[in-house]
Image (cartoon, rainbow, N blue to C red):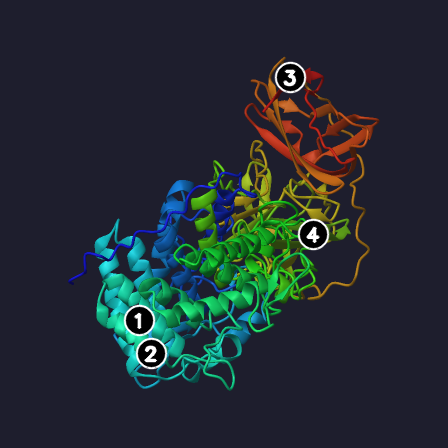
Amino acid sequence: MAVAAALVVTATNPAPATAAPAYNYAEALQKSLLFYEAQQSGPLPDWNRVSWRGDSALTDGADVGLDLTGGWYDAGDHVKFGFPMAFSATMLAWGAVEYRAGYVASGQLPHLLNNLRFVNDYFIKAHPAPNVLYGQVGKGDDDHKWWGPAEVMPMARPAYRIDASCGGAELAAETAAAMAASSMVFRPTDAAYANTLVSHARQLYTFADTVRKSYHECITDATSFYRSWSGYQDELVWGAIWLHRATGEAAYLTKAETEYDRLGTEPQTSTRSYKWTLAWDNKQFGAYVLLANLTGRQKYVDDANRWLDYWTVGVNGEKVRTSPGGMAVLDTWGALRYAANTAFAALVYSDKTTDATRKTRYHDFAVRQINYALGANPRNSSYVIGFGTNPPKNPHHRTAHGSWWDSQTVPVETRHVLYGALVGGPSAPDDVYRDDRGDYVMNEVATDYNAGFTSALARLTSQYGGTPLANFPQPESPDIDEITVETTVMQAEPRATGIKAIVYNKSAYPARALTTAKFRYYFRPDGTGPVTVTPGYTQGCPSPTTARQFSGDIWYVEIDCTGYTIAPAGQSAHRMEVQFKIGVPEGGTWNPANDPSYQPAAGPNRGVTLYAAGTRIWGDEPGTTPPPTTPPPTTPPPTTPPPTTPPPTTPPPTTPPPTTPPPTTPPPAGSCDVSYGTNDWNSGFTGTVTVRNTGGTTLSGWTLRWTFPTAAQQVTQSWSATVTQTGTQVTATNVAWNGALAPGGSTTFGFNAAHGGSNPKPTTYTLNGTACTVS
């Protein structure tokens, strides 16, 4: 392909300011760009830096026989709407074309190139033939009815396309603009890829120009979400401008100028529209700036001036609404994205205009709008998640929230930091804002919200500098035990123990479905008589009917959930309940007290082990003892099973009764190690303690002691050990099943406790009276 030598446009590099910047624009740019990695769909690339995201929507396009994985989820939902996605890519690319130096100076250029390639690779997949473009994956209503993480979406995701018989000029032309603009960003480093993007852009623009139909008439599901109310004329101008810039071909500039005269006007006038702004729907305002800068022709200059004057000083006594704090408020829904888009275009225009008054006016307006979003507002609060002072914490974003319940209110706190996302902000010119997850007007985020904002930050970084954060982002750690098994003793009978076991999947780091789960309940058949395993109620997975030997005198029943899905996708979907009874027939005796999995208190039970694809992901396997001389026989379950739904029972107390520990064997000095970790919340914490025998002698019973640094640290509940406290002195004693610690062996117990605002860790521990090392 012949490409003109003047393709690479030299960006305007503003002179450095003498005054210190109001904000660290490089950090804001770094975080704003990261947001796009949180929005990635499909198999995640190795360079994705969002630790709590995983692969998702891996069958997109399968219904039409194509691979349509990849691209960006639109907002806090999981539909891939091609129209706003393409606009977002165009705006990001435009920022890099104009202000590449800002990305270079902040070290963000590699990340920008990664993200632009990711989305353009999707556009290439979505354009399998010259007059075919897939413009949406996922059905809007079905997607919006469900609230959960992207990795475990349960609904079908149909693919929708435009073609020669059912066109969509605005969609095709916008995608052409995105690929043409992106080609300019890649040309200095990957000319072959840039040429590929230009080739697709040419075909798509010809398609748009030839089949002049509105895309919502073909992709009807988009009508309620992203219908282009401005029509396709603005995209025909916009797309031609970008192809001219990408190729240097005069024919595309001529095409843009010809189509320009058909752009929208103010009602009952011949004056070009100026009371709206550049956004996913209407690009004509961006065309004003681009053509004014490219040609210098007065009619484009006049249109650009009139539009930006409306946003700054007013036109004919009318002006965009402005809050007391200085925010320009065009519309209620996502008002900050309109201000940010306008700010970016104002910066591009101010860098080229020769009108000194307007140069300063538009530049200063843009800086005020971006600074407002970063925290220069009456609330003294940032509207960028994870940046600045008092940023939003509860965006309307399903995956960031991390619900396992298909609910906006469970859990109460958002589990992940959606770094860099610009929220909608105040919905009226009153500077009022609520950090409410359910308020999608003020608190939704979207790829188009961040597009002009990111590009404006690149410009301000070029001028004012700044320093990106080192070692950012850091991986997040789970806020809770993500996947657990809880047990309840349903029947404590002289000859049997009835167990209700529930697997809970509340995973979010990332969210993941269990499809090969198996879990085991361990016991010692030390009573008299043959052991029977009786199945009971099950939510899905087969209830067990037989026992198997684990080692020595320890046996287990296994519940195999292979082929059943347990996923954080809803009230029932995130759990799997299975009931069973282990015991002996009439006349026998049964004692569950020394069973490794027996736990009288209802709750998480680490004595039950859970496996996924053969890997243990929860629980502690029991130690071993010499096998019995004669393995216990088993008998078939009775012909009449227990009721499928057990009668209500009074739950056992949350704290198991103290047990009398066996005599303890003091370890040799320095032969134990303790690991102590916490998961804190406002006024409490969960402690997890692992005790390891580093000596050469088996411990027959153990007692661990430590001292809390503050009196406010008070244990309230424990499991897998009997924990008592006097003052600040804490004593933890083994329970029946974990008292024996072989050399190299370890056991873990946990507890819940209160604290007084600070939660310092203990520094010394003794095991059976001997000091331990701390790891």
Residue type indicated by callout 1? Ala
Pair 2/4: label in front: 2
Among the two numbered marks 2 and 1 on one chain, the one whose residue lies closer to the N terminus: 1
Residue type indicated by callout 4? Arg
Q: Which residue is mark 4?
A: 379
- Disc 4 crowd rating (10 Å Cα; few below 14, some 14-19, many 20+) is some
Question: For this view, does 225 lie left or right of residue 587?
Answer: left
Q: Is there a contact, CB below 8 Å, between mark 3 and mark 2?
A: no
Q: Is there a contact, CB below 8 Å, between mark 3 and mark 1?
A: no
Q: Which residue is mark 1?
A: 240
CA gap, disc 3 to disc 1? Answer: 80 Å
CA gap, disc 3 to disc 2? Answer: 87 Å
Percent position of residue 408, x then y: 65, 62
- Disc 2 crowd rating (10 Å Cα; few below 14, some 14-19, many 20+) is some
CA gap, disc 2 to disc 1? Answer: 9 Å
CA gap, disc 4 to disc 3? Answer: 60 Å
Q: Is there a contact, CB below 8 Å, between mark 2 and mark 1?
A: yes
Percent position of residue 509, x then y: 54, 49
Q: Which residue is mark 2?
A: 259
